[in-house]
Image (spheres, rainbow, N blue to C red):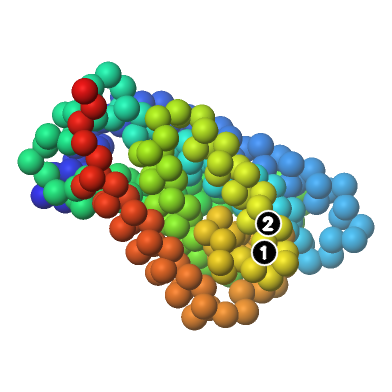
Amino acid sequence: MLTACIKTEQMKLKHSHLWLVFLAIPLLPTVLGAGNYVNNIGILKSEWYSLWTQHSLFYANFFYGPLIAIYCSYIWRVEHLNYNWNSLMTMPTAERDIFLAKLFLALRCTVILQLWVGVLFAISGKLVGLQGLPPLEILLWLLRGSLGGMVTAALQLVLSMVIRSFALPIAIALLGSVAGFLMTSSGYGMIWPYSLMMMGMNANKNTDALSSPVGFAAALCVFLVLFISMGIWYLKHKDVHA
């Protein structure tokens, strides 16, 4: 049944133009990061790693979370329009499968987004004159950031499900990301869900600063179980609209 739900969700997105948003918006932190690197090249001596500090500074802290939120708001927007929520609630489908299908699509989008950001990072590095290719370690950081993005996606799905507004959950994601930057800087990133994507990406750092991989994995699991449980519980207890 989960597979059928995933196919249904894919059909709902078939004619959307979200892919244009995810192609275009990451260009902005790429340009900002490259520009910042070029303007400070006298003090940024670690080449690809230094470029990464500037690129991830803008992308992870201000764009990654809201981009995930845009996707999550969109895939719930269909249900909030007209009486589609009633149709959803009367489907002979387990609430668990409905939420997990949407989460699967959000996670797939997150991974593709991260790979696209990696491509843009490599291109920007060549354009500013860096030699060779980006270190493989940065690819690991991007994929690890996808794991942190899973938590953000699960949380944003819950918010977009509960809040009918399209824009408000996106604004929450932006504020949560800014707060995540402050929490991470203060050493409390593990207890703030929006911090995990930044920590996974090693944002604004040129060496791996994730001091506790086990703690990171544990935080991922705890938040994922929490937000998935919240989403399924809400679907089970939310009645149709009159």
Q: Which mark is residue 184?
A: 1
The x, y position of residue 13, in whole percent, is: 30, 31
**Residue 164 at least partly seen:** yes
Q: Which mark is residue 26?
A: none
Quadrant for the C terminus in the image? top left
Q: CB atoms at circles 2 and 1 under 8 Å apart?
A: yes
The x, y position of residue 179, in whole percent, is: 66, 53
Residue at 66% x, 37% y is: 28
- The local secondary structure at tag 2 comes to helix
Q: Give amino acid for label 2.
A: Phe
How many circles with numbers are drawn on the protein? 2
**As rendered, which of 114 and 203 lies closer to the eye?**
203
The x, y position of residue 188, in whole percent, is: 64, 68
Question: Based on the displayed image, in which of its 4 quarters is residue 25 positioned?
Answer: top right
**As rendered, which of 183 and 241 lies closer to the eye?**
241
Q: Which residue is mark 2?
A: 181
Q: Is residue 151 left or right of residue 196?
A: left
Residue extending farthest right: 42
Residue at 68% x, 56% y is: 181
Q: Give amino acid for label 1.
A: Thr
Question: Based on the displayed image, in which of its 4 quarters is residue 200 positioned?
Answer: bottom right
Question: Based on the displayed image, in which of its 4 quarters is residue 192 positioned?
Answer: bottom right
- The local secondary structure at tag 1 comes to helix
Image height of 127 relative to 77, above or below: below
Residue at 61% x, 50% y is: 177
Question: How far apart are the alpha carbons under marks 2 and 1?
Answer: 5 Å
